[in-house]
Image: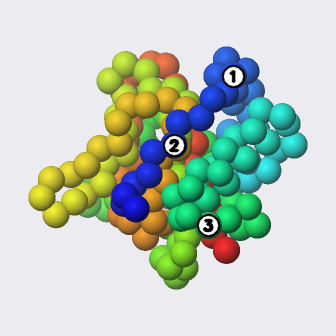
Amino acid sequence: MALIGTYPIRINSKKLIHYVDNASFYLVTGANGATVKTPNNFLDCDVPIIKHLRQSLYKSCSKYLGMKTTDWNIKSWIYADWNGNQGPADSKGVPGPYLHTHNDSDPYALSAIMYLTLPGASETTMFPMPRENYFLPKRLFTWFIFPSRLPHLPGKGKDKKKRYCLSADLYP
């Protein structure tokens, strides 16, 4: 099993982006800056295009682990960012986003990332590795699955157009 699994999906991208463009986002501010995101239940929406996304996540995680995950819990959200919205710096002077992990207490938890838009010079997520940092490839509508405890640094939107990143945690 690779540390980070890659699972492209087939989806009506125009319909999905239209849905996301009209989704409810809110501003989250904290010690690590400001973020614009959806609530943590995005994939729970009872809309056909979102149901398709949810099923594709279950299928991708099942392939990654080699076992059924369709009865596992999902927490999911979309971050929207663009040039100039990264908010204030943290206490060490580093503007958000920041290096972090998910679900440290659950050794079986998985995390997933899917880029819906990556305009211009937008960045992808970086994973610090022993020899050199690894950046996710710039692929749209592809699930990148990895252990939730793997440290990662989200990329930034560096364009006037929004960078949409769908993120999810899957856990028993």
Q: Earlier in the sequence, mark 2 or mark 1?
A: 2
> Mark 3 packing: few (<14 Cα in 10 Å), some, or many (20+)?
few
The span from disc 2 to disc 3 (Cα, nearest Å) is 16 Å
Residue at 72% in and 47% down: 54
Left or right for 89, reference 109: left
The span from disc 3 to disc 1 (Cα, nearest Å) is 28 Å
Under mark 3, the amino acid is: Met
Residue that lies at the very extreme toward the left in this rendered image: 131
Residue at 49% in and 19% down: 161
Helix, strand or loop under label 1: loop
Q: Which residue is mark 1?
A: 12
Residue that lies at the very extreme toward the right in this rendered image: 46
Q: Earlier in the sequence, mark 2 or mark 3?
A: 2
Label drawn at residue 86:
none
Color scheme of the displayed model: rainbow
Callout 2–callout 3 Cβ contact below 8 Å: no
Residue 86, compared with residue 63, is above or below; it is: above
Callout 3–callout 1 Cβ contact below 8 Å: no
Location of the N terminus (image quadrant): bottom left
Q: Quadrant of residue 2?
A: bottom left
Residue 95 seen anywhere in this rendered image of the structure: no
Q: Which mark is in front, 2 or 1?
A: 2
Label drawn at residue 7:
2
Residue 73, compared with residue 11, is above or below; it is: below
Q: Quadrant of residue 130?
A: bottom left
Q: Position of residue 52 (x, y in %)?
A: 75, 39
Residue 68, compared with residue 161, is above or below; it is: below
Q: Which residue is mark 3?
A: 67
